[in-house]
Image (cartoon, rainbow, N blue to C red):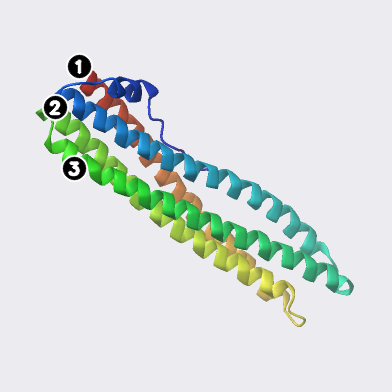
Amino acid sequence: MQKIFLIIPMCILLFASGCTGEKDQMQKELGSILADIQTYEKKVSESENQLASLEKKEQILFGKTVDFGIEERELVESGVSKLETYLEERRQLIVVEQDAVAEAKGSVERLTDLQEGTGDEGAKSVAKLKTALVKRYELHTEVIELYEELLNRQSALYELLIEENVKRVELEEAAGAVNKQRTKLEDAIRVFNQSTLEVNSALKETQQTETE
């Protein structure tokens, strides 16, 4: 299941970029903050696309590797080695994603000062937007933690594949643990995606307020 990303309307960015005066300066700052967030969101989206590609390759290779017989041990070891390489690449992409989210959080905090420098209606819409963004990034952290645990469980399964005296029940238990963790991750992503829709809604509301 893929994550849904923010849809920051270009019209609000373009509107804010041509502003002058005190109120217009606030709108310009809002546009700057949203532009920064959009930049970080793009980094996360690019990471997600690469993760999806690696996961697909890894899944195909895993299927081939587990089909090898006992007499094809070298092929199993070669397959596991490549699986672990894919897994490590995914770990690195997760770090990139975490860094991008941390930067986005910093931009979100700038909304506090913006909220204090605008009128009642504007302050409400900005506060709602900030609350939605904070919630979304907190949920993203939970998703990442679950994903990291999924990587750990997959790594444990791969290691069992090359153990000489591994029992079938051990492999089944390890595979079951992977599937159970994947289900938890999918549930968390579903909640995360709902929060993204809430942010997109808040963005539209902010746009309407600032253009009135």
Cα distance between the residues tagged 3 and 2: 15 Å
Q: Are marks 3 and 2 in contact (CB under 8 Å)?
A: no
Q: Which mark is residue 212?
A: 1
Q: Give percent across and percent down for residue 51.
A: 59, 50
Which one is earlier in the sequence, the residue at label 3 or at label 2? Answer: 3
Q: Amino acid at mark 2?
A: Glu
Residue 200 lies in quadrant: top left
Disc 3, SS: helix
Labels in figure, total:
3
Q: Amino acid at mark 1?
A: Glu
Q: What residue would you read off at disc 2?
A: 121
Residue 163 lies in quadrant: bottom right
Q: Give percent across and percent down for residue 160.
A: 69, 74
Q: Residue furthest top?
A: 212
Disc 2, SS: helix
Residue 130 in view here: yes
Q: Residue furthest bottom?
A: 165
Cα distance between the residues tagged 1 and 3: 21 Å
| Residue lying at 16% horizontally and 33% vertically, measured from the top left | 124
Q: Are marks 1 and 2 in contact (CB under 8 Å)?
A: yes
| Residue lying at 22% horizontally and 36% vertically, measured from the top left | 128
Q: Which mark is residue 137?
A: none
Cα distance between the residues tagged 1 and 2: 10 Å
> Is 121 drawn above or below residue 170 in the view shown?
above
Q: Which mark is residue 112?
A: 3
Q: Quadrant of the N terminus?
A: top right
